[in-house]
Amino acid sequence: MLKSSFSDRWIEAGCDEAGRGCLAGPVVAAAVILPQKFTHPTINDSKKIPAKLRQQLRDEIEKSAISFAIGVVSSEEIDQINILNASFLAMHRAISQLALRPELLLIDGNRFKAYHDIPAECIVKGDGKYLSIAAASILAKTYRDQLMIQLDAEFASYDWKNNKGYGTKKHVVAIEEHGLCQYHRKSFHLKKQLRLAL
C-alpha cells in the first residue's frame, strides 16, 4: 500500500510527468492534491497499471482529489529549452492551475526546479511510494495518451495511437519513409534514437 502523505502538517501536491523519452508529442505533467489520510487499493505507478484500469482510476482520482491540474509543453518548446527543463515547466504549469495552493510539492524523480517559494521533496520512484505522486502519474499518462491518439488521426502513418510517440520500430520506419512532422522533437538526439531502434 502506498503512503497517503509525506507529512500530516502540510497541504501536499504530488507531481509527475509523462512522455520524457518520446520522439514525438508533448511532455505532460499533472499535479494532484488528495484528501488527508486518503487510501486506495489499486492506485500505483502508472507504468504498472493496464491501460483500461488507468482510465478507470483517472475518473476516481478526479472525483476524489481536492484539486488536480494538467500542464503541457509542446514539442516546439522542448526543442527550445530541452526535455529536462520542459518537464519542470510542465509541472510548473500544472501546479499554477491548482485551485488550492500547496504547502509542499512531492516530485517524482531526483531533480526539480523550484516553483516560487513552495518547498519540494524529490523522491526517486515516488510514483511507487506516495499516492499523490502515483495519482499524478496516472493523470499525466492518460491525458498524454489521449493527446497522442488525437494526433494520430492527423498523422496515422506514425502509429501514435499505439506507440504514443515512443521510438518503436514501426515509428522509426515511418519516419524513414515519411520524414519528420511538426510534432517530432527535432533536438531530441533523434538520429541516435533511430539507430538504436533499428
Image (cartoon, rainbow, N blue to C red):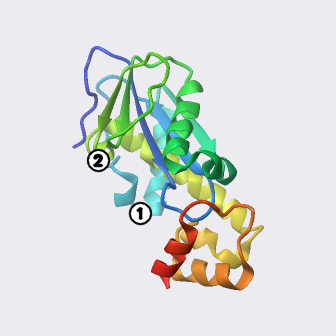
Q: Callout 2: few (<14), some (14-19), or many (20+) C-alpha neighbours within 10 Å?
A: some
Residue 58 appears in the rendering? no
Residue furthest left in the image? 1
> Which amino acid type is marked by label 2?
Lys
| Residue position for label 1 | 50
User: Marks 2/1: CA distance?
Assistant: 18 Å
Q: Position of residue 130 (x, y in %)?
A: 29, 38
Of callouts 2 and 1, the N-terminal one: 1
Q: Residue 39's quadrant in the figure? A: top left
In depth, the one of 68 and 35 nearer the eye is 68
On residue 72, the disc is none
Q: Is residue 8 above or below residue 63?
A: above
Task: Determine the secondary structure under disc 2.
Answer: loop
Identify the residue shown where x is 66% and y is 47%.
Answer: 77
Residue 96 in the image, given as x and y percentages of width and height: 57, 25
- At label 1, counting other C-alpha atoms closer than 10 Å, the crowd grade (few under 14, some 14-19, many 20 or more) is few
At a point 40% along the width and 53% down the height, the residue shown is 46
Amino acid identity at mark 1: Pro
Residue 187 visible in this rendered orientation of the protein? yes
Quarter of the view holding residue 16: top left
Q: Where does residue 3 sit, x and y in percent of width and height?
A: 24, 35
Residue 167 at x, y = what percent?
52, 72
Q: Which residue shows up at 52% across the image and 55% down it?
A: 19
Label 1: state its secondary structure: loop
Depth check, front residue: 13 or 165: 165
Q: Is residue 1 left or right of residue 16?
A: left
Q: Is residue 79 above or below residue 67?
A: below
| Disc 2 target residue | 125
